[in-house]
């Protein structure tokens, strides 16, 4: 309580610039933002669109025209109205499932990674077992067991089958944070475990969590579409998947009624690609090391690394290796996104973004027992 | 560390996963409120396709088959016994066909599409990714962007687009099905040639997406390796580019074996719906019709087979990985 520990109030605060100016958002980010915003707007447009998705406005597969942008579907409903309602349903399912999956994944991952010991063994064992069983299979089994599926039950079911890879990734991050000094300080000052997890660990992996959440949302939207196409979709609701389901059931492709199946197909592709791109570019935003910049930046980075290396060599300080070298093959390298939590890697990593891999594989991560 | 311990450890984990999967497969459909057979039989009668006499017969045979009058654990034992002797039961919807026969008919089609797609897709994808990483520049950018786009695309979306563009609009391939009307599956050359026509679209839609995913992974692994110290060292030693490339490729290739393990499950899941789009008579289409008929024995049999197949495939991949890459072995049997 005395002088030595007094905060250094006189230290001159670093000049604070607008953080967004230094981010140097790549064109990728803007493309992703436009794609995602487009899908969101489409979902919201259903509220102002005059025709309802259940209104019969024509007969089987009326071609576009007569004020109907995309003609009618097999029930004689306006395809555009159904598309808007379907996009909204899919987004709601994606958000709810994404939240459920991310919350479970982060809680399990944080505990496992931070607490360690047999709790970690147990939690990760469970995670890996769940990860090894293809999630679509579990989804099918749960869906046929539920007497009636609504969009909410479907979203929760998707969420509770999708959490394992988030848990695995969060564990890797959390166990690297657990060895930091500020955790010891928190312990010494008497913080309890939940408080440490919330205040001292979570903030370090928050950016990673946000990115995982983005992927969970798009993964859930695609999972819903897959289930709906198999005939296990939400009853009484339109979604992108049910729209495709009916289009396929009524031979829209074979009869050339492109307006009935192309719009949901394209929206699903946009959702998937847009969210993936958003995740990849968020990675760049949060993680400066991945920022692909101009040549100048790369040179600066190289110079900085050289300086760091020289400094390290001269001070001969004991250097910590990469946080988890064995992880490289398992997920660290594949998922590339070490996030801001990892200590600066001494190995010169090529500045080209490794990020998108994470997206491509993380989303599809199934199988692979530790 | 030693290989035996690694394999033993993996085996135990995969056995645990297998037990979990089989239990889920058994338990979940039994959570249907009431007796599942009641639900099915009443659904069947609502359709009006079945007479009272048949209904009673079906009901009794199912109660006996599943031992529904016995406690749950005994049912589970019965179930396990049947599964391990390879008896998958009798179909509800097309009674009294055995599920084994139905799956036996559908399985070859699915395997014929998926296995080559996995192998060829993996090899080509790695090649494309590696070349993109080495060449760099515009080549890299275009390959990377298109791979990323393709790998992000759901299998069924590409299927629908291919079916519409190549079959309906261009007329290059037949629209759906697996062989011409009136043909009977056999191994005669004429039938195989005919089936090949129908084979291309489902195969392409799986393999293209798969190539995309693998290429994206390989590219970043290769770029990562390019920055490795051993590359700088080799260059400083004056070792030729080709030789260095070879080193990089071999090192980058190893983690891609895990990439294969990770993507098999998704591909098999995606293939289910791809078959549906093309009306291909494989396991996916069978699953679809089983779901619409509430044909629980068929659904359960398919989910079980797919799970086991994916687990076995992943297990094999991991064992191979452990054999070829000593680092992984050390990491897995080491402290963590």
Image: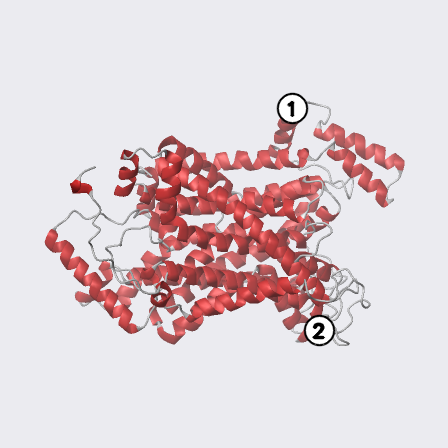
Q: Is residue B128 rendered to the left or right of residue A222?
A: left
Determine the residue positioned at 32% across, 44% down: A177
Tag in front: 2 or 1: 2
Front residue of A241 and A341: A341
Please name the residue that numbered disc 2 is placed on.
Answer: A69
| Tag 1 subunit | B
Q: Decide: is A321 above or below A33.
A: above
Q: How crowded is mark 2: few (under 14 residues within 10 Å), some or many (20 or more)?
A: some
Q: Decide: is A302 above or below B57.
A: below
Residue A189 in picture, x, y percent from top left: 28, 35
- Secondary-structure class at tag 1: helix
* Quadrant of the rendering where the N terminus of chain A is positioned: top left
Q: Is residue A292 visible?
A: yes
Q: In which quarter of the image is residue B39?
A: top right
Residue B330 in picture, x, y percent from top left: 30, 42
Front residue of A50 and B271: A50
Front residue of B318 and A275: A275
Q: In which quarter of the image is residue A218?
A: bottom right
Please name the residue that numbered disc 1 is placed on.
Answer: B74
Determine the residue positioned at 58% across, 33% down: B23
Structural distance between the alpha carbons of marks 2 and 1 = 59 Å
Residue A361 in picture, x, y percent from top left: 45, 55
Q: Decide: is A147 above or below A16.
A: above
């Amino acid at each position: 309580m005395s002088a030595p520990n007094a905060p250094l109030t006189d230290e001159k605060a670093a000049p604070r610039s607008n953080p967004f100016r230094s981010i140097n958002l790549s064109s990728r980010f803007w493309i992703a933002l436009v794609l995602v915003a487009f899908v969101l707007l489409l979902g919201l447009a259903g509220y102002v669109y005059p025709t309802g998705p259940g209104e019969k406005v024509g007969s089987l597969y009326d071609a576009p025209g007569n004020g109907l942008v995309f003609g009618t579907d097999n029930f004689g409903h306006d395809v555009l109205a159904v598309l808007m309602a379907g996009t909204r349903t899919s987004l709601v399912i994606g958000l709810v499932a994404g939240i459920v999956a991310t919350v479970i994944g982060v809680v399990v991952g944080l505990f496992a990674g931070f607490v360690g010991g047999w709790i970690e063994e147990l939690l990760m064992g469970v995670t890996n077992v769940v990860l090894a069983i293809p999630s679509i299979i579990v989804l099918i089994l749960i869906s046929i067991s539920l007497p009636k599926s609504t969009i909410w039950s479907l979203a929760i079911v998707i969420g509770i089958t999708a959490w394992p890879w988030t848990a695995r990734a969060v564990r890797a991050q959390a166990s690297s944070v657990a060895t930091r000094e500020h955790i010891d300080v928190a312990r010494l000052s008497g913080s309890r475990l939940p408080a440490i997890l919330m205040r001292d660990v979570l903030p370090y992996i928050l950016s990673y969590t946000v990115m995982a959440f983005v992927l969970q949302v798009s993964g859930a939207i695609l999972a819903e579409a897959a289930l709906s196409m198999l005939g296990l979709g939400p009853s009484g609701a339109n979604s992108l998947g049910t729209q495709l389901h009916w289009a396929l059931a009524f031979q829209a492709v074979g009869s050339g009624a492109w307006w009935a199946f192309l719009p949901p197909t394209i929206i699903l592709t946009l959702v998937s690609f847009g969210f993936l791109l958003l995740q990849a570019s968020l990675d760049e935003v949060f993680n400066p090391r991945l920022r692909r910049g101009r040549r100048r930046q790369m040179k600066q980075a190289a110079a900085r690394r050289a300086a760091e290396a020289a400094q390290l060599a001269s001070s001969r300080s004991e250097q910590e290796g990469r946080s988890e070298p064995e992880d490289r093959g398992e997920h660290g390298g594949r998922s590339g996104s070490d996030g801001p939590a990892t200590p600066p890697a001494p190995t010169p990593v090529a500045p080209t973004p490794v990020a998108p891999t994470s997206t491509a594989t993380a989303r599809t991560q199934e199988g692979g027992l530790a | 560390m030693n290989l035996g311990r690694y394999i033993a450890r993996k085996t135990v984990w995969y056995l645990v996963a297998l037990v979990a999967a089989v239990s889920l497969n058994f338990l979940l459909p039994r959570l249907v409120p009431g007796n599942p057979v009641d639900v099915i039989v009443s659904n069947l009668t609502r359709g009006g396709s079945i007479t009272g006499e048949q209904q009673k017969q079906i009901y009794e045979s199912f109660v006996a088959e599943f031992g529904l009058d016995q406690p749950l654990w005994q049912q589970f034992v019965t179930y396990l016994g049947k599964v391990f002797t390879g008896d998958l039961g009798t179909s509800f919807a097309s009674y009294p066909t055995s599920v084994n026969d139905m799956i036996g008919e559908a399985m070859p089609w699915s395997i014929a599409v998926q296995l080559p797609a996995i192998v060829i897709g993996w090899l080509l994808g790695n090649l494309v990714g590696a070349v993109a990483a080495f060449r760099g520049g515009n080549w890299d950018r275009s390959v990377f962007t298109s791979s990323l786009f393709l790998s992000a695309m759901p299998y069924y979306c590409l299927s629908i687009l291919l079916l519409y563009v190549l079959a309906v609009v261009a007329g290059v391939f037949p629209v759906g099905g697996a062989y011409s009307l009136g043909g009977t599956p056999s191994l005669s050359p004429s039938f195989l040639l005919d089936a090949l026509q129908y084979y291309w679209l489902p195969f392409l839609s799986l393999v293209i997406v798969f190539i995309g995913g693998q290429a994206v992974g390989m590219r970043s692994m290769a770029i990562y390796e390019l920055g490795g110290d051993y590359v700088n060292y080799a260059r400083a030693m004056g070792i030729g580019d080709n030789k260095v490339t070879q080193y990089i490729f071999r090192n980058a290739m190893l983690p891609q074996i895990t990439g294969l393990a990770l993507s098999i499950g998704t591909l098999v899941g995606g293939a289910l719906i791809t078959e549906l789009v093309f009306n291909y008579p494989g396991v996916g289409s069978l699953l679809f019709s089983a779901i619409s008929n509430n044909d629980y024995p068929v659904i359960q049999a398919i989910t079980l087979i797919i799970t086991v197949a994916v687990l076995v495939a992943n297990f094999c991949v991991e064992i191979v990985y452990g054999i070829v890459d000593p680092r992984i072995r050390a990491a897995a049997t080491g402290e963590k």
